Amino acid sequence: MNYREREYTCRGRTIRLRQPEGVVALRAAEGARSMAPAAATRATGPAVAGLPEADVAAFETAGWSIVPEPAARGAIPSGTKADILIEPSGRMVLATDRLTLQVKSPAGPDADRARLAASGIEVLTPLRFAPGLYQARVVAAGNEDVFDACRRLVNDGVATFAEPDLIGAIGPRGGSR
């Protein structure tokens, strides 16, 4: 399995992840019928061979389907496609289009929303424990994903920090996954 190297900054530390090429995770939107692909399009064998089996099983139990990337192309609603990533610990996580960020020099919720919208970011929820802190999602067109958007927001001086919201599987209490 080939991997693409990805990274983001968390509390001043660079976190490096590996993204397996050719496979993504899909999930049905809330209230929608299952989006799970037919068994014929589910990733099997070599496509999932390098992924942690327990993590794959946990995500599938939670409603995510691991599929070859060509099966995921087309009009997929926001929040239903996730990139698969492997942390340095070997743990599998998913990255959708969501991120948490703090606006540099916040000017209030309405002004911050407009500023972020001009940068291709939609505010979903203001977070109350710091000024200018938001949960948001990437809406910019093109090939930019959440990692690219986080880097751009910080480099352009729009955000003090921007981090992807990663989804991880949690194992049972007192045991391993």
Image: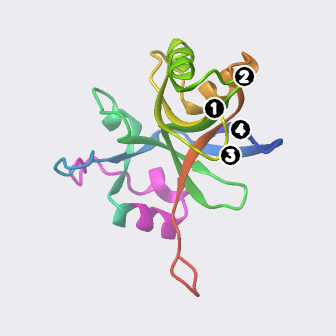
- Relative image position of residue 60 (x, y in whole percent): 36, 62
Q: Earlier in the sequence, mark 1 or mark 2?
A: 2
Going by the numbered disc 1, the residue's amino acid type is Gly
Q: Are marks 3 and 4 in contact (CB under 8 Å)?
A: yes
Residue drawn 60% across and 25% down? 149
| Dot 4: element | strand
Closest to the camera, between mark 3 and mark 2, is: 2
Mark 4 lies on residue? 7
- Relative image position of residue 50 (x, y in whole percent): 56, 56
Q: Is residue 142 above or below residue 30?
A: above
Going by the numbered disc 4, the residue's amino acid type is Glu
Q: Are marks 1 and 2 in contact (CB under 8 Å)?
A: yes
Going by the numbered disc 2, the residue's amino acid type is Ser
| Dot 1: element | loop
Mark 1 lies on residue? 132
Q: Earlier in the sequence, mark 3 or mark 4?
A: 4
- Residue 87 found in image quarter: bottom right
Is residue 106 shown left or right of residue 32?
A: right
Report the front residue among 156 and 88: 156
Is residue 103 shown left or right of residue 35?
A: right
Q: How is the image coloured?
A: rainbow
Mark 3 lies on residue? 17
